[in-house]
Image: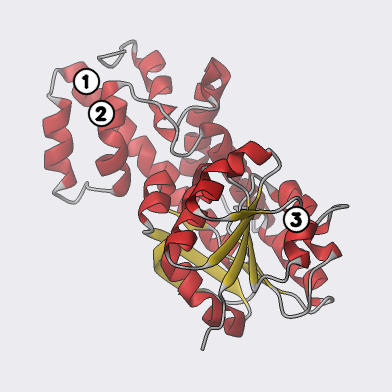
Amino acid sequence: MSNVRSVGYIGMGIMGVAMARNLVKAGFDVTVWNRTRSKCDALASDGAKVADSPSALAAAGPDVICTNVTDTPDVEEVLFGDDGVEKSAQSGLIVVDNSTISPVRTQQFASRLADKGVLYLDAPVSGGDIGAQNGTLSIMVGGDAGAFERCLPLFEAMGKSIMHLGPAGMGQVCKACNQIAVSCNLIGVCEALALARKSGLDMGKMIEVVSGGAGGSWQLANLGAKVASGDHAPGFMIDLVLKDLSLVADAARARQLPLSATSLAESYFRAAAADGGGRLGTQAMAKTLEGLGGFSYPDR
């Protein structure tokens, strides 16, 4: 049975704020930290405590520390840097990494922490800002099965589809698979909307009809209307999906696996980023098709 009550959360980005807030709502004793301290203010207003550093957070003796930062070097810094978690971590601590990072480095991090009696779960998530806010994320977990069982109540406060996938690194491999599916699906959504727009078809009606059939998807239902209206506000930024697709490319290259559709999606995202769209939402992939097709969406 789980005895996890106190949780530290590192990383107050779009996803981290919402996920930590759901832990507070679920009754966990939550302490947060972020490099820019002001980003912790919203959680402090919700009742969370604020730590001065990752090391100080670990020194307080939480049952679990979650990390949710941008990339592999950022995870390494908050765990093993001069003021990182490892400096004051106590034996028995569980570190749960909700970031999307390298599966190989994930295994190395797990091994380094094990030397201090700390268990490590890689637990990347999918579902975007909407899933984070609603507590309906998909959570893909690799690592020690006993630690996973202890952390189940924590995961259930943040997500609905929760799966233990095997040893350390398997959560990150699964997230790479997820990013392939998401990115390639978004190409289809953007191309379908482009054809509807250029043909004079009512895009709202097209989205409704197609969503009810075999062409329906999360991407179409949640991002289709945003593409059609030119709403590029980020739930998940293009710069971040490009980081994720670089991890996918590394994994595929190591396994001599061609991923042609994924490469096309990456090229669409890179074109949008080169046009100044790196900090826009992934639905701004559609801007690339606007340029190629010589059209624009309404309300721009």
Secondary element at tag 1: helix
Residue type at the position of mark 2 = Leu
Residue reaching furthest to the bottom: 1
Q: Is residue 259 visible?
A: no
* Relative side of 272 to 218, left or right: right
130 and 45: which is toward the camera: 45
The answer to whether residue 148 is above or below residue 226 is below
Counting residues from the N terminus, which is met first, the one under dot 3 or under dot 2?
3
Locate residue 13, reporting x and y percent.
56, 42
Q: Residue at x 11, y 32 (%)?
A: 205
Marks 2 & 1, CB-CB < 8 Å contact: yes
Q: Residue at x 60, y 70 (%)?
A: 6
Locate residue 229: give its quadrant.
top left
The colour mode here is secondary structure
Locate residue 261, reporting x and y percent.
46, 42
Question: Residue 54 has which mark?
Answer: 3
**Quadrant location of the C terminus in the rendered image:** top left
* Residue carrying label 1: 197
Rounded to the nearest angstrom, the CA distance separating label 1 from label 3 is: 49 Å
Secondary element at tag 2: helix
* Residue carrying label 2: 193
Locate residue 166, reporting x and y percent.
57, 77
Locate residue 273, reporting x and y percent.
55, 24
Locate residue 221: give its quadrant.
top left
146 and 198: which is toward the camera: 146
Label 3: how many Cα within 10 Å (few below 14, some 14–19, many 20+): many
Question: Residue 60 has which mark?
Answer: none
